[in-house]
Image (tube, rainbow, N blue to C red):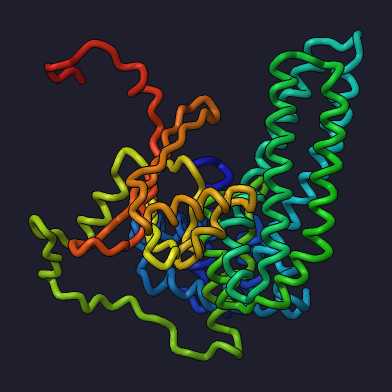
């Protein structure tokens, strides 16, 4: 645990002790607000769990919810709109844009220096460092594609999201080309390519801030923003750590428009809940554990072209998040690839093909991607399984190994 986390742990412990001693919630909300402003929900949860492991009663730790709710309510009254509160997905997107502008400004200066014949090795290294930093923008785009866009599509707001995904891919291609130029040390070309990248990213940020984010804030309610927030960490963030000030669960509970009772965590599943399979029986937990530990990623799309499952493996090759469940598979790919998706599905439904496969080299990995049709015992089409596997080590195998060698 780092010193910063340790200090936060001490503050959190102090707040809980004073709650236990009878100090009024209102007297602690300012201190708690400062604590959570630059602390992620996951970090708060980890600290709370650590306190419980130390022996703090669960009931005392749970009382923090009262303080958090007061802080939330006070902050919301101050900023007026939830999207302006630290921790809200829109606020996080905007915070990333703010950091991106700083990085682009520095990258531009570095590119100018590197292009000069008098540039030194530190100048080149500074350019490389800034370029690597800028590549973090992929997380910004991936969160939009996997978390925000599905909820907007459900509101029939599809055109702008598809156009914007296309812009993401254009920028990805530009960044890849810039990386190739830097790798070849073609410093004279760097400046022009950097300028193209900067222009494209700034244009996209303008569209985000003037159209996408304001429209999203109007169209989506607290339940929908909570769904976005709760799946964000599966993809990650670019350059920022979101605040815990805007809390998804509190937003749902306090929303006057959503007064349904909160779901409980009571498990009513019978103890003997094994599912009979064609061969053997497995519990849902065993099935989930087995699928998550396969040495490759799988995604299942049903007969209606909707994503129904993905294996949440510890290290995924391509980003996935909970918002993808129930989404049309065509909308899970950039516009330029949709015709390929439709062709694969059509061939499988017509039983003209039994596999489609691709292989790409990405970030030093050799990735084999295969699609298989799924039919029931009667031969009816039931969907597609996508299997993605990193096979560099497999490709390198030679000879044979017949004995166990750890």
x, y percent for residue 184: 72, 14
Q: As drawn, is 236 to the left or to the right of 376?
A: right
Left or right: 179 in relation to 142: right
Quadrant of res 94? bottom right
Q: Is residue 355 above or below residue 56?
A: above
**For the view shown, which residue lies furthest in the left direction?**
280
Q: Quadrant of residue 212?
A: bottom right
Residue 406 at least partly seen:
yes
**Residue 202: x and y, percent?**
84, 47
Q: What residue do we see at 36% from left, 69% from top?
A: 58
Figure quadrant of the C terminus: top left
**Residue 23 visible here:** no
Q: Is the residue 109 above or below the residue 28 in the image?
A: above
- Residue 285 is left or right of residue 140, and the answer is left
Residue 140 left/right relative to 368: right
Q: Residue at x 70, y 65 (%)?
A: 159
- Give the quarter of the image for residue 244: bottom right
Residue at image location 54% in from the left, 30% down from the top: 362
State the image coordinates of residue 13 (x, y, percent, origin top left).
49, 60
Q: Position of residue 325 (x, y in %)?
A: 45, 64
Of 284 and 186, which appears nearest the observer? Answer: 186
Residue nearest the viewer, comparing 35 with 191: 191
Q: Residue at x 58, y 80 (%)?
A: 24
């Amino acid at each position: 645990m780092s010193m910063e986390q340790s200090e936060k742990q001490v503050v959190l412990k102090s707040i809980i002790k004073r709650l236990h001693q009878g100090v009024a919630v209102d007297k602690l909300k300012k201190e708690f607000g400062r604590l959570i402003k630059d602390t992620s929900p996951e970090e708060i949860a980890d600290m709370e769990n650590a306190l419980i492991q130390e022996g703090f009663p669960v009931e005392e730790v749970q009382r923090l919810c009262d303080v958090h709710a007061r802080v939330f309510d006070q902050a919301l009254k101050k900023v007026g709109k939830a999207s302006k509160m630290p921790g809200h997905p829109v606020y996080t997107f905007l915070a990333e844009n703010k950091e991106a502008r700083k990085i682009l400004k520095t990258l531009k200066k570095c590119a100018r220096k590197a292009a000069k014949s008098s540039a030194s090795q530190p100048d080149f290294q500074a350019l490389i460092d800034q370029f690597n930093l800028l590549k973090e923008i992929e997380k910004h785009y991936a969160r939009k594609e996997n978390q925000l866009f599905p909820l907007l599509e459900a509101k029939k707001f599809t055109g702008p999201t598809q156009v914007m995904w296309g812009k993401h891919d254009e920028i990805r291609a530009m960044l890849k080309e810039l990386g190739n130029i830097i790798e070849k040390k073609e410093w004279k070309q760097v400046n022009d390519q950097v300028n193209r990248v900067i222009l494209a990213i700034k244009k996209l940020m303008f569209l985000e801030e003037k159209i996408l984010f304001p429209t999203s804030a109007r169209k989506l309610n607290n339940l929908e923003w909570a769904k976005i927030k709760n799946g964000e960490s599966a993809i990650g963030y670019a350059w920022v750590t979101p605040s815990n000030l805007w809390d998804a669960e509190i937003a749902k509970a306090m929303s006057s428009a959503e007064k349904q009772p909160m779901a409980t965590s009571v498990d009513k599943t019978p103890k003997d809940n094994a599912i009979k399979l064609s061969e053997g029986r497995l519990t849902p937990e065993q099935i989930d554990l087995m699928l998550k530990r396969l040495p490759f990623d799988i995604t299942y799309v049903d007969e209606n072209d909707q994503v129904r499952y993905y294996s949440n493996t510890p290290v995924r090759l391509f980003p996935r998040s909970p918002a993808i469940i129930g989404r049309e598979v065509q909308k899970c790919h950039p516009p330029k690839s949709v015709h390929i998706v439709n062709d694969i599905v059509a061939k499988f439904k017509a039983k003209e093909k039994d596999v489609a496969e691709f292989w790409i080299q990405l970030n030093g990995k050799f990735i084999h991607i295969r699609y298989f049709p799924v039919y029931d015992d009667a031969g009816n089409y039931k969907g597609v399984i996508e299997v993605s596997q990193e096979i560099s080590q497999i490709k390198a195998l030679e000879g044979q190994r017949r004995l166990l060698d750890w």
